[in-house]
């Protein structure tokens, strides 16, 4: 049932360019990149039980990495720059993870937020990164290998398919991760950290690995976002970014892989809708979020699915 | 005294002043978390609300003191209403939902600010009798208003310490933080205690915004930056600890001020580096219960 829904969705997205206009191609492309970002966060929030409010740090690192790797009037090599960008995000996640994973609960939320903000202020103050105005990437990264160009990221339609491919690849990769022994271990940590520790699992290392994987995928989303619009600014690191992606998770339903995708579509489309109606679209957005929290505690996805297990009581730490 | 020593001392004063102001926010944040178990992202928005109240009411009455006198009960009222409508429903919810709801509240407060007052940057005049600087040497001086700010914040901090340590309300608050069920069993209306604590926290943050308005000016998004710095203070000091919030505020105020003066290239980052160091050393903060 679920699988046929997913296949149907993927097929619809694959066929969409036949009917959709340029504006919607770009919008859906953006949504699919946000879906990658949201899935990566779900690995932490939904599966490992780590509520991060600073996931934009890695999104921004991926984006700025593309800028730093792009020659001014020439294209960066896609096959070199993308792995470096993803690797840089993963390394940063390892370093930050070592620090923030020493904390838990609400400390973890505050500490992740603060680290992302550190990058935000660094980018805002850095000449190299263009300060608060940000930077532009004049030529899209070029995936040519041995004279053959498999796709052109400057072409709107081809970018759309690249984003779709990246989203599906992320989905499949995360599904594989979650079905592995590692995946079961991190879900065990979410359910009960003490129990996993008692069973002899190196809990810290598992959490750190999850943090690094999530950071790497967020870096991929940031890299592709920078490639889509050709510009990067400190808002990529901003806490609105972290907040929005967290909202996508909740809206779609945490603890599933399709939830973040659903949420990315729902939230971005709602944003577009409110944005059309009023300049002050954040007002209905805020009301919408509050109502969603008060009335829909399990997200859109939760409407269809029974909640997997009752939420544990919040523990004062 | 030589100018460089005086200059250094002026920076110390600046750092302490910034730290004391921060304490008004961080103490509310840490109390609301420590006692009610709620992580409140909208705390910075209350600071912004205070600053805009000071601006609008000063325009209206022509007097900052009168504006503050009117602004405080208004903030308490806002705190009570928000607790009743929203926060009271969050006590038993997962942190995730607290984060989201308060995030939504930030968006609403920013847009209401934009609708009611607009998106311009405003200045607020200092009260006339404090609008002068105390000359220290031929070239250096220190503004009297900042000195007054530090004094007022200190008085508030002392009053808070007295209330928490010496009064019945303070005793109930401490008991509520330690064991909520036990307090209710003893026949104390814990919901009422929460309401009072929350409204006090809102009023403290708003008051910080009001007295900071003449020196910091009043601008959109002003709450977000101070919110995150307040989080850093709470992480450093240890959640729920007023003493920790006080020391953390002073540390951050000084680190930030000296960072800006002596290491301007990395000035935005000094406080976060300090936080990283504290997290490495004591993950639960200086005064946190591990």
Image (cartoon, coloured by chain):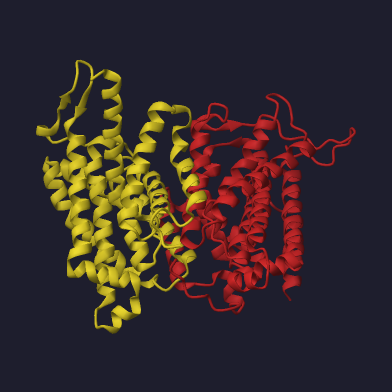
Chain colours: A red, B yellow
**Horizontal arrangement in the rendering, residue B29 relative to residue B196 (left or right):** right
State the residue at coordinates (20%, 69%).
Answer: B169
Relative height, residue B2 to residue B66 (above, below): above
Q: Tell me residue B283's x, y (percent).
A: 49, 55
The answer to whether one can see residue A21 in this image is no
- For the N terminus of chain A, the quadrant is bottom right
State the residue at coordinates (72%, 73%).
Answer: A2
| Count of numbered marks | 0
**Horizontal arrangement in the rendering, residue A46 relative to residue B133 (left or right):** right
In the depicted view, which residue is nearer to us: B50 or B261? B261
The answer to whether one can see residue B258 in this image is yes
**Horizontal arrangement in the rendering, residue A282 relative to residue A178 (left or right):** left
State the residue at coordinates (13%, 51%).
Answer: B69
- For the C terminus of chain A, the quadrant is bottom left
In the depicted view, which residue is nearer to us: A307 or B200? B200
Q: Tell me residue B130's x, y (percent).
A: 13, 33
Q: Tell me residue A277's x, y (percent).
A: 46, 53
| Quadrant in the rendering for residue A197 | bottom right
In the depicted view, which residue is nearer to us: A276 or B51? B51
Relative height, residue A247 to residue B59 (above, below): below
Q: Tell me residue A28's x, y (percent).
A: 65, 52
Relative height, residue A2 to residue B98 (above, below): below
């Amino acid at each position: 049932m679920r699988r046929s829904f997913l296949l149907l969705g993927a097929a619809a997205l694959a066929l969409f360019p036949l009917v959709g206009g340029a504006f919607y191609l770009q919008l859906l492309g953006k949504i699919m990149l946000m879906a990658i970002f949201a899935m990566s966060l779900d690995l932490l929030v939904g599966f490992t039980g780590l509520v991060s409010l600073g996931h934009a740090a890695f999104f921004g690192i991926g984006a700025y990495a593309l800028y730093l790797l792009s020659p001014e009037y020439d294209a960066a090599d896609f096959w070199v720059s993308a792995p470096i960008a993803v690797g840089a995000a993963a390394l940063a996640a390892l370093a930050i993870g070592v620090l923030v994973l020493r904390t838990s609960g609400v400390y973890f939320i505050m500490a992740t937020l603060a680290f992302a903000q550190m990058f935000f202020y660094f980018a805002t103050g850095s000449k190299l990164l263009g300060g608060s105005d940000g930077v532009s990437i004049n030529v899209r990264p070029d995936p040519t290998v041995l004279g053959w160009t498999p796709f052109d990221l400057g072409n709107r339609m081809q970018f759309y398919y690249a984003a779709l491919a990246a989203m599906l690849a992320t989905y499949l990769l995360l599904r594989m991760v979650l079905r592995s022994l590692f995946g079961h271990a991190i879900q065990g940590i979410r359910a009960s950290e003490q129990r996993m520790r008692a069973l002899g699992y190196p809990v810290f290392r598992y959490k750190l690995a999850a943090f690094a994987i999530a950071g790497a995928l967020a870096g991929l989303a940031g890299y592709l976002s920078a490639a889509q619009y050709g510009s990067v600014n400190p808002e990529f690191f901003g806490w609105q970014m972290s907040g929005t992606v967290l909202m996508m998770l909740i809206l779609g339903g945490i603890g599933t892989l399709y939830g973040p995708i659903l949420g990315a579509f729902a939230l971005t489309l709602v944003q577009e809708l409110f944005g059309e109606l009023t300049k002050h679209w954040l007002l209905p957005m805020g009301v919408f979020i509050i109502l969603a929290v008060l009335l829909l505690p399990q997200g859109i996805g939760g409407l269809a699915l029974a909640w997997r297990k009752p939420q544990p009581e919040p523990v004062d730490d | 005294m030589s100018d460089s020593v005086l200059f250094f001392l002026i920076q110390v004063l600046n750092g302490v002043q910034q730290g004391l102001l921060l304490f008004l926010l961080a103490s509310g944040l840490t109390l609301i978390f420590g006692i009610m178990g709620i992580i409140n992202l909208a705390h910075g928005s209350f600071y912004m609300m205070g600053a805009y109240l000071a601006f609008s009411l000063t325009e209206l009455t022509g007097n900052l003191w009168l504006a503050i006198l009117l602004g405080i009960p208004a903030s308490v009222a806002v705190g009570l209403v928000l607790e009743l409508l929203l926060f009271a429903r969050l006590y038993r919810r997962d942190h995730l939902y607290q984060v989201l709801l308060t995030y939504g509240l930030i968006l609403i407060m920013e847009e209401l600010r934009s609708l009611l007052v607009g998106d311009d940057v405003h200045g607020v005049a200092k009260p006339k009798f404090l609008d002068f600087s105390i000359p220290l040497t031929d070239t250096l001086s220190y503004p009297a208003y900042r000195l007054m700010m530090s004094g007022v914040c200190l008085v508030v901090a002392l009053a808070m310490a007295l209330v928490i340590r010496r009064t019945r309300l303070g005793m109930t608050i401490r008991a509520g933080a330690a064991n909520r069920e036990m307090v209710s069993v003893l026949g104390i209306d814990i919901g009422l205690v929460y309401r009072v604590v929350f409204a006090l926290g809102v009023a403290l943050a708003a008051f910080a915004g009001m007295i900071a308005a003449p020196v910091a000016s009043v601008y959109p998004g002003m709450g977000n930056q101070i919110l995150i710095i307040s989080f850093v203070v709470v992480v450093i000091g240890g959640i729920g600890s007023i003493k920790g919030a006080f020391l953390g505020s002073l540390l951050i105020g000084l680190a930030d001020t000296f960072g800006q003066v002596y290491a301007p290239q990395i000035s935005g980052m000094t406080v976060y580096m300090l936080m990283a160091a504290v997290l490495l050393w004591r993950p639960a903060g200086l005064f946190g219960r591990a």
